[in-house]
Structures are given as C-alpha cells and as structure tokens.
Amino acid sequence: MARRIASMLSQSQAAEAVPVEALPTLPFDHPQIVEKAIERLRGKATYSSLPAFLLPSEFTMNDLHHVYQQTIGTRLDQASFRHKILKQDIIEPMPNRFRGGAHRPAQLYRLTSRALTPFERKI
C-alpha cells in the first residue's frame, strides 16, 4: 500500500504526502472521505498488520512500534508491543541486516506476508 501511494505521488506533479494534522482545505466531500479513511485505519490498526504496510520493505522494531503508536493515536508499552508482534508471526528478521546508529545497530525486519493479517487479540 505504501509503495503504491509513493508510486502515485511520484507520477503526479500536484500530489504531496502530508501529515493528517496538516491537511490543506479540501474541496467537495474530500474531508469526510479522509476522516472515514483515518477512522477505518485506526480501527483496524489495533487488531491487524495494517500499519506495517505504511513502512518500507525493511524496517526496525522501533519503526514498527512508532507507526502503530501514530496510527492508533496512543502510547504502547515497547516491551509488550514487541512480545505481541513477535507472537503474531507477521514479521521476520532479515539475516545479517542491521541499521546503524549511535549505539548498537538495530535488527531489520520484513513482513512475512504481503497479505493483511488479523490478530487473535488487540495490540
């Protein structure tokens, strides 16, 4: 989904990705369409892998944690989140792939399936 959006943006001179909080004034019924899309995204984020599709193909656990928090709109305990996500088997570590930083490099992960996966329990 994120790749399709990026592809559409690159093909259009006028399209621009902006944070939801910074949306410009939209014409017609577009504000209602955006509001409904956000509502559905937030609702599905608590019980599915949907937010992971907003990330690039390689991501860190911290990236995934951040996108879930932003999508749901609430703070999630990092240790509990990690445990729940790994238990769902929706991601897998990429062998010998790390993202460097000031401290210990972070393990990179990828989705195990390109299909939306519902969870047994909410995140």
Image (cartoon, rainbow, N blue to C red):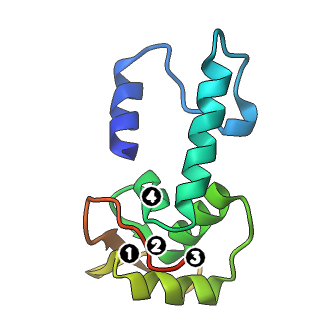
Tell me which numbered mark, 2 or 4, is placed earlier along the sequence: 4
Pair 2/3: label in front: 3
Tell me which numbered mark, 2 or 3, is placed earlier along the sequence: 2
Within 10 Å of disc 3 (Cα), the crowding (few <14, some 14-19, many 20+) is some
Tell me which numbered mark, 4 or 3, is placed earlier along the sequence: 4
Quick one: quadrant of the N terminus? top left
- Badge 3 marks a residue whose secondary structure is loop
Residue depicted at 61% across the width and 19% down the height:
30
Residue on which the image places disc 1: 108
Q: Contact (CB < 8 A) between labels 2 and 1?
A: yes
Which picture quadrant has residue 28?
Answer: top right
Determine the CA span between mark 2 and mark 3: 18 Å
Please give the label number shown on residue 123: 3
- Badge 4 marks a residue whose secondary structure is helix
Residue on which the image places disc 4: 50
Which picture quadrant has residue 32?
Answer: top right
Which picture quadrant has residue 90?
Answer: bottom left
Determine the CA span between mark 1 and mark 4: 18 Å
Determine the CA span between mark 2 and mark 1: 5 Å
In this picture, residue 29 sits left or right of residue 113: right
Q: Is residue 44 above or below residue 100?
A: above
Please give the label number shown on residue 60: 2
Residue depicted at 59% across the width and 78% down the height:
102
Kind of residue indicated by mark 2: Thr
Residue depicted at 61% across the width and 89% down the height:
79
